[in-house]
Structure formats: structure tokens, C-alpha cells
């Protein structure tokens, strides 16, 4: 079972070991991977298209998702709505292959640069709503009005996901 909390788990292999966080200098300047998971055991992950630089999504990883992403070279996340480990593309075919992974200065956020495979019924995309990017709307400054930056969906979510529950939480 997945462990969303900061509890110590055995790594998947000896290849992935997270260092303990011992000092600011170690966290900011060393070559030791010492991620800081939040109180729910999660770390934020911004995912962008490796070719265009377009922001595709913001997701979260628990320890297991981060380990699996490192070991497999494909994006894994922790679904906060479903409370499960999620290998991006298992259902949709919209697999995110990691081209580069970075961690920020205080090691509490991940940045993935990915290449997108075409989904089961579509061109490359990332959003469960059917758009290429999860950031498919703009927010007007001063008014807060939303507008669609992506005018058309890349795929029909009902064809890809059928009657699976929508992960959006109200």
C-alpha cells in the first residue's frame, strides 16, 4: 500500500536513497537528494513539455511516486483525490517520459521535463479534461475573468476514461 506520510520506507532498490536533511548547506549545496515532503507526505511537482517548455500540470508525489519516477523514467504521482499512487498514462496512454528531473533549492519542489506519448485516442496531451495542458485557461488581471487559451480539446475524455470517476474534488 502507498504511504503518503513521511514514514520511513525501504527504498525500491539500493539505487534510490534519500539523504536525511542535516544542514541548510547540505540541502542547498550538496549533491545529496534530501527531499522535504510536507505534513501529508507530499512534494509538489511542476511538469512541463521538454520540447516547447509549456507547463502541462502541477501534481504531487509521495516518497513512492518519487522513487518510481526516478527508477522508471516515467512520471508517477500521488493522487490526492483518489488517495492512490498514479502512473501517468496507465489508463489514458498519455505516458510522460522524463527527459530531465530537477529539484528546487530547498528540495521541496520537483520539476519534470517530459516527452508526451500520444494517448489511446489522441495526440499528445496531459490533462484529464481533454486539453493538452491542465493550464488551459487564462485569468484576466484586475477582473479575474477566465478565458480559454486552448480553444479545442485534444481528446474526448469519455472515450478515454469511460465512466471512471472524475478526479476533480468540489
Image: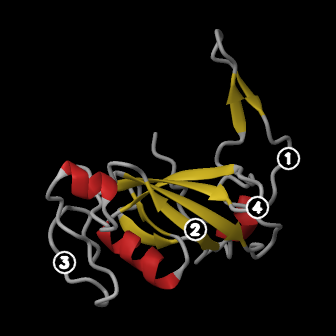
The residue labelled by disc 1 is 152
Q: CA gap, disc 3 to disc 2? A: 25 Å
Depth check: give the residue in front, 79 or 45: 45
Q: Which mark is residue 100?
A: 2
Q: Choose the circle earlier in sequence order: 2 or 4.
A: 4
| Tags 3 and 2 touching, CB below 8 Å | no
Which tag, 3 or 4, sits closer to the chain's start? 3
Mark 3 surroundings: few (<14), some (14-19) or many (≥20) residues within 10 A: few
For mark 3, give the secondary structure.
Answer: loop
Measured Cα–Cα span from mark 3 to mark 1:
43 Å
State the separation of the CA atoms marked 3 and 4.
35 Å
SS at circle 1: loop
Residue 29 image position (x, y, % from top left): 32, 56
Identify the residue at horizontal 40%, vertical 61% (top origin): 82
Write the residue at 49% across / 60% down: 102
Badge nearest the viewer, 1 or 4: 4
Q: Outermost residue, top direction? A: 142
Q: Residue at x 74, y 73 (%)?
A: 119
Q: Which residue is mark 4?
A: 51
Residue 58 horizontal side relative to residue 79, left or right: right
Amino acid at each position: 500500500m502507498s504511504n503518503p506520510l513521511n514514514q520511513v520506507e525501504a527504498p525500491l532498490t539500493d539505487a534510490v536513497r534519500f539523504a536525511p536533511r542535516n544542514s541548510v548547506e547540505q540541502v542547498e549545496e550538496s549533491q545529496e537528494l534530501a527531499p522535504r515532503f510536507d505534513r501529508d507526505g507530499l512534494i509538489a511537482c511542476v511538469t512541463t513539455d521538454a520540447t516547447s517548455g509549456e507547463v502541462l500540470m502541477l501534481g504531487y508525489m509521495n516518497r513512492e511516486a518519487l522513487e518510481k519516477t526516478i527508477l522508471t523514467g516515467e512520471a508517477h504521482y500521488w493522487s490526492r483525490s483518489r488517495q492512490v499512487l498514479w502512473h501517468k498514462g496507465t489508463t489514458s496512454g498519455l505516458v510522460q517520459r522524463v527527459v530531465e528531473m530537477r529539484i528546487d533549492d530547498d528540495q521541496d519542489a520537483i520539476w519534470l521535463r517530459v516527452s508526451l506519448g500520444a494517448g489511446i485516442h489522441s495526440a499528445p496531451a496531459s490533462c484529464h479534461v481533454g486539453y493538452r495542458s491542465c493550464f488551459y485557461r487564462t485569468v484576466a488581471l484586475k477582473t479575474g475573468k477566465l478565458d480559454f487559451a486552448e480553444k479545442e480539446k485534444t481528446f474526448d475524455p469519455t472515450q478515454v476514461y469511460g465512466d471512471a470517476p472524475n478526479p476533480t474534488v468540489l
